[in-house]
Amino acid sequence: MMTPDTWQKSSYSGGGQGDACVEVALRRTHIAVRDSKTPGRAPLSFPTDTFTTFLEALKTQSPHVTAPC
């Protein structure tokens, strides 16, 4: 379970130190997304419902495609 502002790497992070993928963090009303290779840069932020809809669309439209990282 994620807690607010705790960054979690994609379950598809692979190879080496697993630092070549995206990370997400729960915020009060948004989901923050950042590049795990450059965590000090400003993250992107999306309303929770919008991000959830985006993820569901990816699962529905491309169930056989996996993340490259």
Image (spheres, helix red, strand yellow):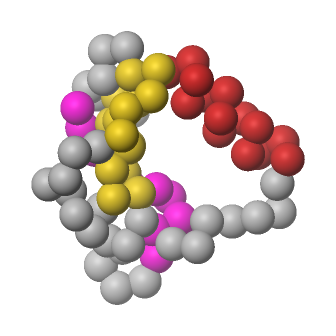
On whether residue 54 falls in the magenta region, the answer is: no
* Nearer-the-camera pick, 33 or 11: 33
- How far across and how far down the image is residue 30, in percent? 39, 22
* Main SS of residues in magenta: loop
**Residue at left offset 46%, top offset 76%:** 14
Residue 16 percent coordinates (x, y): 34, 85
Residue at 49% from the left image edge and 21% from the top image edge: 48
Q: Residue furthest left?
A: 40
Picture quarter with the N terminus: top left
Vertical comparison of 49 with 61: above or below: above
User: Which residue is rendered at x = 24% and y = 38% of the image?
Assistant: 6
Q: Is residue 62 left or right of residue 33?
A: right
Above or below 62: residue 57: above
Q: Is residue 3 left or right of residue 53?
A: left
One can see residue 2 in this view:
no
20 vs 22: above or below = below
The image position of residue 10, as x and y in percent, is 46, 56
Q: Which residues are magenta?
A: 5-14
Q: Which quarter of the picture shows residue 66?
A: bottom right
Q: Judge whether residue 15 can be spotted in this image.
A: yes
In the image, 48 versus 8, the foreground residue is 48
* Residue 59 image-quadrant placement: top right
Q: Identify the residue at the far top of this view.
A: 29
**Left or right: 32 in relation to 37:** right
Where residue 69 appears, x then y in whole percent?
Answer: 51, 72
